Structure formats: C-alpha cells, structure tokens
Image (cartoon, rainbow, N blue to C red):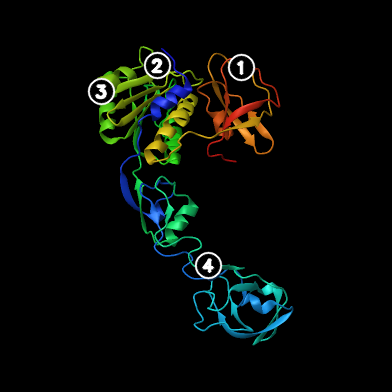
C-alpha cells in the first residue's frame, strides 16, 4: 500500500471541490449555514440620528460656561419622536435609542447633569458636537452589502439578517451523508453481542462529527462481510448521498471487501493509504461528483480520519472557504514517547493558559482517551521523545470542557 502524506491527502480531497447548489432557508433555521448570495441593507442604519445614551439632547455651543442651566422642552423615548427643534438654551430629555431632535448636535449623559426641576436641567460637563449620538447611515448606507456570499451564519450574523429584514437567506445545500459500517462482528447498540461480537459505535461517533460540521446523515446501516451485500449497500447509498462513508473492511485482509466493491460500483480511487497513525488504510474516491471515504474500522482510526479528512470536505461542500481544523502551538504538560515513521495523532486535554496533556490509550480500538480529552496533539514522524514544556501542535476543534 503506497502511503501519501497528510498534506497531499488534504489537497486531493479538497481540490476542485465546490459548494453544493443553493437553496432558500428561513434565517431562523440557517445557523452555521453558508451564504451563497450577499445580503444588502434595505435602509440606512441607523435610520435616524440615534441617541446612544440616556441623557439630554442639546446644542454643544450652549456649554461655553459650566455649569449651565437649560430649559427642558420635551422628552423623547425610544420609538417616539419630537417634531420641534432644539433652540438656544434648550434641551430635550432623551433615552437610549430615541431619535435626536433637530437642532441638537450632541447628547450629554444623565450622569453629567443635575435635574433642578421637571423643566430645568443643569449640565455639569461639556460635550463636543457629535458625542453620544449615531448619525443616520453611519453604520450602513441603504443598499450597502452587510454580509458577503461565503459568510458563515453565526449568531451575530443572523442578528444582522434580522436587522435588515432578511426573513429568508440563500445558502448552500446541506451535504447528504450515508454511513455504512461493515463486519460480521458488529451488532446494533441495543442487541446483545455474541461471545466474539461487539456493538457498533463508529456510525455514532462519526455521525456526530458529520452533524457537528453541518452535514445531514440521511441513514446508516451495518453491512455483513459479503461481497454481494456490500456492493448492493454501496449502490443504494450512492443513489442517496453526496458523501458516502464506509467504516471497516478497507485494508488488505481476506474479508476486506470494501475497496474492490467500490471499484465494481464505479468509484474511482483517488488514494488508498495515508502516512498517519492511526488511520493508515484510509481510502478516498469519487463517483462523479459524489465523495467516497473508506475509513478504517477501529474506532480511534475511524474517528481521527473522519475528523481530519471528512469534515474539511463537508465544510467545503457547505461553502466554507477554509475547511481544515485550526492548529495551535501549546506547551506539553506531560511527557510523550518518540514517534515512529508516521505522524501520530493522540488524544489530549487542553487547559487554556497552562498547556496540553497527552492521554494514554490502549490502541486503535480504545476510544476512551478521545472521550476523556478535548483536543488532539499532532506529533511529527521520527520525532521525540517529548518532555514537559516542549512545544507541540494541537488541533483544538470544537472544544468541550
């Protein structure tokens, strides 16, 4: 099995990979989706000169001497207005968000005033023209693009959609994903395993990763170690999926039927084998515009390769410009043995400001280390041993406590 480098594998997965077609979605249902079309403001923001403080709208030139008493001629609440004009020696009591009346060029916050009577205010400090008010159109002009195509709709950006009255947004379609786990040794979660069987878990862990990245797992199944059944399962999956994930049966053993069955069903091999630990047997291919991944069956290998290679593809199909997981440099809080001739991804716990501790596992079938940790440490090939205090590369992903 010819192994390719991780960077090359990433490039081969992501090259020529374009976002899926667009669809209209109510903005309230579009969290973390990616815009396929820009959004513009339908009117100036703010739509009027708006007070940024509770206080008094006034003419700044009236504050040449301090303290200064001004006559209070009106009160303006948010949502209301004063149609008159503020003249010399006058002020209008105003609340945050209310429109600043004509004639006033500043707002003095209430903390810098003293109310002597309902009709009189004493201003204790000067305020320059323009202070504590937002001019009409100072945030956005009418017709200005406020969110560009390609923007991920975070909570703040969804708030912008609401502000400009965008009840529906054009976003890239969610990738449909099918996950098939292969192996006669596998049983469903609710079944009682035989003496030499195990409950299948990869569809759960990998499926949750896919959903966290924005993919839609349309169905999953366990496939026995049978060539006809495997080919049929692949054929049915490709009819429904944008992305097919096969877990297990992808190595070179006598019962590893996935690669030859994929070939029979018209899947073109892009690569088969990556220089990584765990996850060396990883397969990637294409069936037209559909993506096919063959993940190793061991739970850790399946989890790591899905996180490193499947999730970037899901994000790119959704329209993300950068699909790879962020990598940061942190200080080790534990010692780690030397690596072999492949880069090694190990579970770890990050404590911000203190560093990262690598967790022990019992091998590629032991998912407990990743269950206990909140990150992965990336150790280069032929490196180490590592000591406390050494810098290492860490994939933090969507960290949990």
Distance of label 3 from label 4 (alpha carbons): 62 Å
Q: Position of residue 184 (x, y in %)?
A: 36, 21
- The residue singled out by tag 1 in the image is 383
Q: Mark 2 Cα within 10 Å, few/some/many (few <14, many 20+)? A: many
Q: Nearer the viewer, residue 142 or 2?
A: 142
Q: Nearer the viewer, residue 223 or 94?
A: 94
Can residue 23 be seen in this snapshot?
yes
Whether tag 1 and tag 3 are in contact, CB under 8 A, the answer is no
Mark 3 or 4: in front is 4
Q: Position of residue 254 (x, y in %)?
A: 36, 12
- The residue singled out by tag 4 in the image is 135
- The residue singled out by tag 3 in the image is 266
Q: Nearer the viewer, residue 391 or 197?
A: 391
Distance of label 2 from label 3 (alpha carbons): 19 Å
Task: Tell me which label, 2 or 4, sits earlier in the chain.
Answer: 4
Instruction: Say which quadrant the C terminus sits in.
Output: top right
């Amino acid at each position: 099995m010819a192994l390719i480098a991780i960077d090359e594998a990433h490039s081969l997965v992501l090259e020529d990979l374009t976002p899926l077609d667009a669809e209209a979605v109510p903005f309230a249902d579009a969290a973390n989706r990616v815009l396929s079309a820009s959004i513009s403001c339908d009117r100036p923001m703010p739509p009027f000169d708006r007070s940024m403080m509770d206080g008094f709208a006034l003419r700044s030139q009236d504050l040449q001497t301090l303290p200064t008493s001004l006559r209070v001629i009106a009160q303006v609440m948010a949502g209301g207005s004063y149609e008159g004009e503020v003249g010399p020696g006058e002020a209008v009591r105003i609340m945050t968000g209310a429109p600043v009346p004509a004639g006033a060029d500043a707002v003095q916050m209430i903390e810098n005033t003293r109310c002597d009577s309902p009709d009189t205010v004493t201003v204790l400090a000067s305020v320059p023209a323009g202070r504590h008010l937002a001019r009409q159109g100072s945030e956005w002009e009418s017709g200005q693009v406020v969110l560009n195509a390609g923007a991920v709709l975070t909570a703040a950006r969804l708030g912008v959609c609401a502000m400009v009255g965008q009840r529906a947004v054009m976003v890239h379609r969610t990738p449909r994903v099918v996950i098939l786990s292969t192996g006669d040794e596998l049983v469903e979660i609710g079944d009682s395993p035989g003496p030499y069987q195990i409950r299948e878990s990869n569809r759960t862990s990998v499926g949750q990763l896919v959903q966290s990245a924005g993919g839609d797992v349309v169905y999953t199944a366990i496939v026995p170690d049978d060539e006809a059944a495997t080919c049929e399962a692949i054929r049915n999956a490709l009819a429904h999926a944008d992305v097919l994930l096969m877990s297990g049966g992808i190595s070179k053993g006598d019962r590893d039927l996935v690669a030859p069955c994929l070939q029979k069903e018209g899947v073109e091999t892009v690569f088969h084998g990556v220089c990584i630990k765990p996850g060396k047997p990883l397969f990637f291919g294409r069936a037209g515009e559909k993506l096919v991944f063959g993940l190793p069956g061991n739970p850790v290998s399946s989890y790591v390769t899905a996180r490193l290679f499947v999730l970037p593809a899901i994000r790119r199909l959704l329209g993300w410009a950068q699909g790879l997981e962020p990598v940061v440099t942190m200080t080790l809080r534990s010692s780690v043995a030397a690596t072999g001739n492949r880069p090694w991804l190990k579970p770890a716990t990050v404590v911000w400001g203190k560093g990262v501790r690598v967790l022990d596992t019992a091998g590629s079938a032991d998912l407990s280390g990743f269950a206990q940790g909140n990150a992965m440490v990336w150790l280069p090939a032929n490196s180490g041993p590592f000591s406390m205090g050494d810098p290492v590369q860490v994939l933090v992903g969507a960290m949990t406590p």
